[in-house]
Amino acid sequence: MNLHEYQAKDIFRQFGINTPAGEVVTTPAAAKEAARKFSGPVMVKAQVHVGGRGKAGGVKFCKTPDEAQEKASKILGMQIKGLTVQKVLIAPAADIATEAYVGIIVDRARKKPVFMVSAAGGIDIEEVAATTPEKIKYHAVDVRYGLMPFEALELGFFLYKDAKLARGAAKVMQQLYAAFMANGCSLAEINPFVVTPTGEIIALDGKMVIDDNELDRKPDLEALRDVESENPAEVDARENNLTFIKLDGNVGCIVNGAGLAMATMDLVKYYGGEPANFLDIGGSSNPEKVVNALRIITADTNVKAILFNIFGGITRTDDVANGIVTALKQNPLKVPLVIRLTGTNEEIALKILADHGLKASSDMDEAVQQAVKLAGGAQ
Amino acid sequence: MNLHEYQAKDIFRQFGINTPAGEVVTTPAAAKEAARKFSGPVMVKAQVHVGGRGKAGGVKFCKTPDEAQEKASKILGMQIKGLTVQKVLIAPAADIATEAYVGIIVDRARKKPVFMVSAAGGIDIEEVAATTPEKIKYHAVDVRYGLMPFEALELGFFLYKDAKLARGAAKVMQQLYAAFMANGCSLAEINPFVVTPTGEIIALDGKMVIDDNELDRKPDLEALRDVESENPAEVDARENNLTFIKLDGNVGCIVNGAGLAMATMDLVKYYGGEPANFLDIGGSSNPEKVVNALRIITADTNVKAILFNIFGGITRTDDVANGIVTALKQNPLKVPLVIRLTGTNEEIALKILADHGLKASSDMDEAVQQAVKLAGGAQ
Amino acid sequence: MSVFINKQTKLVVQGITGRDGSFHAKQMMEYGTQVVAGVTPGKGGQKFEGTVPVFDTVADAVQATGANTSVIYVPPPYAADAIMEAAASGVSLVVCITEGVSVLDMTKVYPFVKERGVRLLGPNCPGLISPGESKVGIIPGRICTPGPVGVVSRSGTLTYEVVYQLTRAGIGQTTCVGIGGDPINGTNFIDCLEAFEKDPATKAIAMMGEIGGTDEQEAAEYVQQHMKKPVVGFIAGQTAPPGRRMGHAGAIISGSAGTAAEKIEAFEKCGIGVAKRPMDFVELIRARLK
Amino acid sequence: MSVFINKQTKLVVQGITGRDGSFHAKQMMEYGTQVVAGVTPGKGGQKFEGTVPVFDTVADAVQATGANTSVIYVPPPYAADAIMEAAASGVSLVVCITEGVSVLDMTKVYPFVKERGVRLLGPNCPGLISPGESKVGIIPGRICTPGPVGVVSRSGTLTYEVVYQLTRAGIGQTTCVGIGGDPINGTNFIDCLEAFEKDPATKAIAMMGEIGGTDEQEAAEYVQQHMKKPVVGFIAGQTAPPGRRMGHAGAIISGSAGTAAEKIEAFEKCGIGVAKRPMDFVELIRARLK
């Protein structure tokens, strides 16, 4: 789960990291009011879950409260990579001497949280990695020991020659690591990691991604979820324990298991079609899940055919068949349906479908070809 | 540093361990007052830094406030193993169904904190170890991982067949481990670890020993030190950075280094004498330390001769010589003095001593024999 | 012959009295797996299905029954602890079926298990099956048949699909291993390839990867450098949108975007046959068995 | 010949600009030790005594100078971190002189150092000296002389006493090692005995123990089972009162009261010559060198 900048900064503050006070507002008038409180220039920053909002015009420097109001009115409601800006953060503008990058991410290869730090911050870290990789230092943390003081100080000295700044940076590394671990993050980032002309260290922008697996045991974090800023269909799917990602094609896919779901989409493409989505109903399905899946898929007007591909292991195919029948009763489909179904309780499932005039194939390849054809053939 | 029972229990409570509320008092009248508040039978428990206070009559069950006053008047001022009882803890008496033992200690062989648990609590754990060792379970904790839930539960099931009690005990193990680590303990113990007839788990008595090396960085713990309950000479020594333990002999020993100090005492004994103390002036000595050491030793009227044994490595022997000279000027000795001194700046030291009419040997054996003789010969 | 499990495997089921644990324990017993013990704290002393003794701790179960393998069906918040309990108990293989285990928990579990020389499969994996010998986990037994192919895969149902097609075509398997798709898991492709290379009964290997990470690329290099047996590979996710979880920083860390194209290229470079569709495994494997 | 350090030892001094560190760095340089670097965070770029480069981190020092050994003179609260920094930097021997290191800190340091295959001596130890070759720590150089005896001891000044008497009697040393008296230390008697047994120049060993723990008893068994070279031992603390710190629980844990009598008995049982007084080492060692 992605946190907004202002949420990440709230957590940073709890862990002692120096980050400017800010206020989140949803109207231009409130933006003006907030800017007035900070007496001085402010930044108006779109709070959306995508990168590159600065380039898209979602971050503006404002000298006066009036200017803040004017910029906020432009940013609020703006579309950035398909998401509508609902909130802006008003924060005092900082004087900047240097900008560094400090991030932690769980690395699957090293199987550890890994620090990435670079004195070349402020801009895209991808660009630094691509053009001047020697400017990035990586440090994998052994969670059994935690981030040790000497390790934090080595990172500090990589950023700054000056011992006072190196020690100050080391302290922030410890704080960021503590925040990362305590909140079950998969990513935590300070960029830019700013030193002001007077030598103060400030986390000017922050980002945190929480491992979804942590949310059940961390209700405080789940409460930070901003459903309004997400794709409504994806929110609907998550609330019904489905994994759904919308795409641009016309073949709606309902599959059990992420790997098989991706393989099904790939096969749609192989036969010239375009998948309309990724949708995984997961392991232990029940009819309700299937009903919800069909509801979400059919809401997409691009979808011209729907393909079920179910390989029953833990999933009982009769549950799926019952779900299909129930859903069709509630909302008859306007587009053709292709069902591929094999595995646990297959005979029962086929009988349930047959009783309602539905056929099913046991062959994935055949089913995919048929679905592509029914959706209008190869594009 | 040893904590009193009531101090250990305060810490237990901070970590969520269920332990009866109590009150520490220093007068029989206050004992009565405290007993009245608990409405019901109470225990009056001597707060002294020695084991076996129960056997010595320092722990009494009292049915009424008047009885509490009477028992407190007997216990306050009582001598237990050479220490005077200055404080008693008044605590409500508990109904006891079973008594277990739970302790953690840093084990030098395993180089880890080790849990010792036994369902045979209440009595001396030494006796259980000696007579029925199979009744004790040991579990070494890898501090890199901490005490893991499954480990705590294994310990819980070793104590209780009942799953609810096992889980309850496991929780207390986790809390005790957290208290142990957070307070830099070398020992933490709950004995008896009580289950009441209604199935409640209570830490009825508690003990904690803090690693002295932790005290500098844990001022809150240093503040718990109860100097009044310690041997005044040992307190004096500690406050002057000397390690001093009083013994019963007549040869006062002042040595640098614990190993050499013990070897010196052994040699005194070898030649038929009895050492009056262990006193280590430590590595980087200065004249002031020597002055304090002489003051502490000469306060012991048993001492019939004083022996210096200094091997100068980091210790500069001229510092020691200056200290001796200064001390003698302030307080001329009433008993003979033997000085053995070799190593760093030996020539300067010998000159300082000679200028004040003092001689020194460079041979340890010779010096020890002479000191024993001057103290009155072999006992 | 087989890898990791066989007829001698003596299994303890952690969470045997739970919904998933009891269902699959029965399935495994029906398949012929020696299920020697179950564990549910507080239910020690009971019998599962009237025959399998249940214990309070894995240590007790292992001591009493000599179990050498554990399979875990406990809820996500307790799964990491369950893995460590199993690893500390003396079993040599731990298979964690549970999905949704915290990734940071796994950063602690991984060194714990490694230090003890224990093999961990999963978490979030379907387990493994050596057809005709033993099944540990949830792979449906009836889609498998004994034969010469080693199967290793990051995903569950995709494995079933491929194994099902192989079986229908009369091509049996030595062992099918689902290593799981979580960011941090106990056993990777290389571990399995190494085991299959050593297993005399395995004559060819089918390997199913996914987008993300660099495991497949490393496996490809391993195949080129260390393996004599033929390998056929597939990558799921050619049409998947770029991963949104880790964003770009993940790609920088791994030095790779982890795309399907990149992985397929690595396969081709290293002499691995590339199946474009799941069904292509049948012909590609058949050709390599001749 | 010698153990652990020799003429090739290239030393980095952690805390070189501090009071103790600077004093002993000079002493070691005077003795002939190759002091190649110092470390004090914030003083990187300076020169100690005009010749020895100072770095901000041990990693920088090792990379720039190829130091293979570190000696630590930093205050107690920072010593555990300093040991781990040294162990992570690539040196193979770390000697920690600092007294007063938290014992719980050491429970973390110990596995950290072991995992990296690094030898730690101390904390709270005087270090070691190979007379005529190199000195790392604080043992006074002038009391030592080259010769055939390996010396290992838990205490500082008692070591000096024995070495001094050996030297005065014309009996030199290969290496004198002070392992330190803290409850948890990096190197124990057995480690040193093993090294002396392997060192061709060492012909006999002098070992000084203390009351408390069971290191001496285990060392005695090791001598009996694995050593051909003669060993003479001494135990300090026959007259010491029973330890008050750990009380009885400590004795239960170790299965021993750790008394001098117990340790001396173990020495006698295992064929170790027992010195009753420090001066007895001279004759006992002389007899065994013949």
Image (spheres, coloured by chain):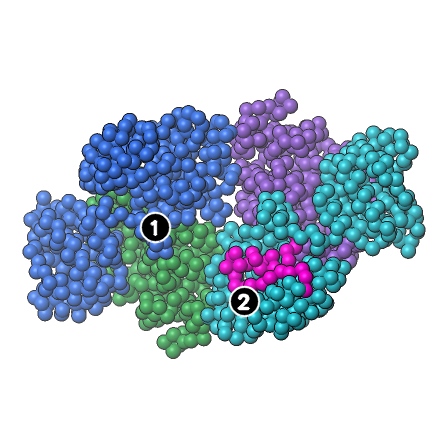
Chain colours: A blue, B cyan, C green, D purple
Q: Nearer the viewer, residue A303 or D201?
A: A303
Q: Which element carries disc 2, helix, strand or loop? A: strand
Q: Which element carries disc 1, helix, strand or loop? A: helix
User: Mark 2: few, some, or many residues within 10 Å (few <14, many ≥20)?
Assistant: many
Residue D89 visible to the viewer: yes
**Mark 1, residue position:** A221
State which region is magenta.
B1-28
Q: What residue lies at 60% left-to-right and 46% top-to-bottom?
A: B219
Q: Nearer the viewer, residue A223 or C195?
A: A223
**Mark 2, residue position:** B202
Question: Dot 2 falls on which chain?
Answer: B
Q: Nearer the viewer, residue B184 or C28?
A: B184
Residue C3 visible to the viewer: no
Relative to C218, A302 lies left or right:
left
Question: Label 1 is placed on what type of residue?
Answer: Leu
Q: What residue lies at 88% left-to-right and 40% top-to-bottom?
A: B332
Q: Image height check: is B117 above or below B258? A: below
- Foreground mark, 2 or 1, reads 2
List x then y, in percent, for residue B270: 86, 52
Q: Image height check: is B162 above or below C1? A: below
Question: Dot 1 falls on which chain?
Answer: A
Cα gap from disc 2 to disc 1, whole angstroms: 35 Å
Q: Within the magenta stretch, is there residue B13?
A: yes
Q: Within the magenta stretch, is there residue C131?
A: no
Question: Label 2 is placed on what type of residue?
Answer: Ile
